[in-house]
Each structure stands twice: as C-alpha cells, then as structure tokens.
Amino acid sequence: MRRRAVLGAGAAALGAAGIGWSLLTPKLPGKLLHSRAPLPRPFEARLAIPAVLAGEEIVQREADLAILPGLTTRAWTYNGSFPGPTVITRSGRAATVTHRNQLPEPVVVHLHGGHTPAGSDGYPIDQIMPLPPAAAHHYMATMAGDTTVGARTYRYPMQQRAATLWYHDHRMGFTGPAVYRGLAGFHLVRDDEEDALPLPRGERELPLMITDRAFEEDGSFRYPLGDADYMNGVLGDVILVNGRPWPVHEVDPARYRLRLLNASNARRYRLQFDPQPPGGDAFVQIGSDGGLLTRPIGHDTLELAPAERFDVVVDFARWKPGTKVRLIDRDGGDVMRFDVTGPKTDDPSRVPPVLSTSAEPLPPPKRSRTFRFGQGRDGTWRINDLTYQPGRALARPRLGEVEHWRFVTDFHHPIHLHLNHFQVVSRNANEIGEYDKGWKDTVDLRASEAVEIAVRFTDYTGTFMLHCHNLEHEDMAMMADFVVEP
Ligand SMILES: [Cu+2]
C-alpha cells in the first residue's frame, strides 16, 4: 500500500509539471448523467444469470426488457437479452458464430480478448448492414470496409487458453451508444488445464457483468448522443449487474467463482465487500483478462477499468450465515448484495497454490514503441497526436516477434490491444501494480502515467486495433491500426 501511495504522489507531481493537460482535464473519467425515471431502491431485484447460447447463431434485435419496476426498456440485444447469451467454447476447437442484424443500424462484433484472425476480429468498418437492402444501401454509400448485408459468420479458431472473454459492438464512431443500448455478452473459453483444478463450478461459478446506465422517464436508456459535454465519458446513476439494478443473490456459505467484467462505457470501480471478512483478502484473484494467473493473489479491493476482467474466488463461509454482504464501489456506492444463507454445506472446491504454468516472461523485445494518448486542441482524443483513420497503421510489428509498447497518458485511459494478450512489465518506470499481473488485454492508466507492456504477435497477419476502451474516447477517434506483417 505504501508503494502505491508514493506512486500516486509521483504521478500528481508529473501532472503539475506538465501544466497543459492537468489544468484542462477533470479528475473523473467522465460526466454523471442523471436518470429521469423513478429509480428502485438497491437490492430489490434478483440477480439473473445469462443463458448459454445454444447453437451458433445470434440475432441482433430490439427487445423490451424489464429493468426498472413498472417500466420497460427498449434495448438493442443479442437474442433478446441483456447481457446477451453466454457463448462457451473450447480451447483448440474452432467455433463460428453467425450474427444476423435485425437492428435499424449497422453493427460490428468484436470478440474482446479473442485471438482472432483479422477478417473475424470486428474491424470498425467491417459492418453488418441492416435489412432491408434499401437501408443497407444508405449506409454502404459512406462505408468502405469489408461489409455484408443482413448477416455475417465470424470464425474463431480458439487457439488460446481458457479465459473470460466478452463480445460487444465495435462499430466505427458508434460503439459507445451501441454497447450502452445492450450489445454485450460473455464468451467463456474452457480448457483441460483449468478443468483439472478443483475450482467452484456449476451454480457456484457466476459471470457478473457490471455496467452503469441512466434512464429516460419512459424507461428507455438515456444516452447523450452527440453531446460534447460528455466527451470525457458517460457515467450512469444506476449500477446494473447482468442487466439488473443493484441485484441480490443468495449464496451458500461456500466458495464461489466470480468472473467480474466491467462492461461500463467509462466508469471505473474500486470493489470491496461490506462487511469485509475477518482477516481480509476477500477476493482471491485466480485469473486476469487472459486466463489463470500462476498463483492466486489476495485483495481487499479490486480496481476494474472499463473492459477489464478479474476472475476471483470468494469464500462466503468466512461470513456468518445470515450476513448480507454488500459489494460496493468505494467511489460510487452499492453494486450488488450477496445474502449468505443456510447451514454449512459440502464444499469440494479449493484454490490450489499453483494455478497455471503458462505465464513465463516473454524474451527481450526486438523493438520498442511509444504511444501517447492525449486530447487534441479541437477536443478529439488522439494517439500520437493523430485521430483515427482506417487504413493508417501506427505500427507494423513482424509476426512472431516480441515488442515492448510504452503507453503514456494525459487523462485516465483503459488501453486495449487486439489479437494478443500482453504482460505489463513496468508502471511509471517502477514495479507493476497489483492489478497488472498475468496476461492482460486491457491496462488501466491514470492521468500522467506511463506503462510498458511486452507482447508477442502470433499466428495471424493483417490489420488489428489498439485503442482506448473508454467508449466515448474510442468513438471520438482514440484508436489506431497496427498491421502484423509476415
Ligand atoms: Cu481514453
């Protein structure tokens, strides 16, 4: 803890020295948008677990969801639900998912954390046009990507280890509103290494997608499309877990595996239990964005930036049966509640001291590059002072080679790399942070921070993305292409 405090002070000093950004940029990663609908009290809704996708097809369509009491929310959905159905695939076994677009606008699907060839990676102008063809024609006129009309089949080789991935919309300039309207779902990859561990499973394995939203008076999602006041990021005043407002879930006094995903557009969370269990370390982290850690790590607090995943085991036997354990955000209030019920039950699960052997450090890099994430004088969000332009590559790494990429920020930016998971090698020229461990695809940077990552570009050549995952920044052009060359 002491080291973190010192780093924080160092970052503040840096910010004051580089006067430009620190005076212009606010402290919050966005602006709070208030709901106009009456809101329920926390802990009145039950947690819902998204259904597992049966088959290989998802229909994107509008649906009326029951989120707030007495109102319906017209959402954009995958198969009629928010979150969408959970896709489950097996490491090493190729999978396809066909998306049909019955929404009124074009869509793009990105499998976040997927090790996916360029043609199925969800490049922002590779859009699925809406039907009927007349509507498609209208959008075609302005788009130059590899587009299809009505449907597209994404091919996922799944040459990657078990991990919590998620799929979401990635359309050029409109990712923020599309995800906010409901286009997000889990995709879990399983493998033999993980199956062999005695981790909690079945009803004691819970994917938890955390989002924040604001609502209009009629119950529809409130999003400030095109409002420059919200270009730093949109923060809602309701926390949804798996699409339910501040839900409750009854748990046995036993271990549970929680696959936490921050799918919010801009909000960061500092999650903590209230009360905390005796002895602390309530969250035993077993995995990161890219799957299992080598060894578990105990945390009292978990910090999740947009798009990050933390795979944790929580032992609810550490609280007395009858305890109502709130999961709170130290910056924003309630998230959800776990009610520990019943007498002690059988719990065959445990967390072994060694989880995985596949996290050896990467060899030294062939080359290093620096990417500066900052705001231009016109207000656009930029990388290396460039706004996004499809087809303009900021880097051309060679297939099979290791590179070090250094990210430097002016403001809080969660930075996401497509194609390969990476390892964080330093933060502010110092040791990595306590949330940087394991294989990552998104790394959280605060204002005036510098993080260095090591990444090896493997298996697929072609064009991929590097971008900020604050979706309002992403839509305001904070993206870049990189091309993996043979
Ligand atoms: Cu950003």
Image (cartoon, grey):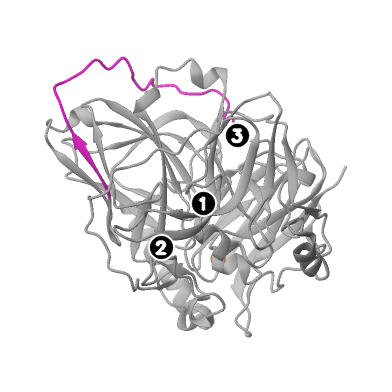
Whether residues under marks 3 and 1 lie with C-beta atoms below 8 angstroms apart, the answer is: no
Asked if the stretch drawn in magenta spans residue 141, the answer is no
Q: Earlier in the sequence, mark 1 or mark 2?
A: 2
Cα–Cα gap, marks 2 and 3 = 39 Å
- Counting from the top left corner in percent of width and height, residue 349 is at 33, 18
Q: How many marks?
A: 3
Please tell me in which quadrant of the rendered image residue 324 appears.
Answer: top left
The residue drawn where x is 75% and y is 45% is 152
Q: Which residues are magenta?
A: 336-360
Return the residue at label 1.
307
Return the residue at label 2.
213
Amino acid residing under circle 3: Pro
Return the residue at label 3.
361
Helix or strand or loop: what does disc 1 sit on? loop
Amino acid residing under circle 1: Ala
The residue drawn where x is 46% and y is 57% is 264
- Counting from the top left corner in percent of width and height, residue 453 is at 61, 48
Q: Earlier in the sequence, mark 2 or mark 3?
A: 2
- Counting from the top left corner in percent of width and height, residue 233 is at 49, 70
Q: Is residue 418 visible?
A: no
Amino acid residing under circle 2: Arg
Q: Principal SS element in the magenta part?
A: loop
Whether residues under marks 1 and 2 lie with C-beta atoms below 8 angstroms apart, the answer is: no
Q: Which quarter of the rendered image does ligand 1 occupy?
A: bottom right
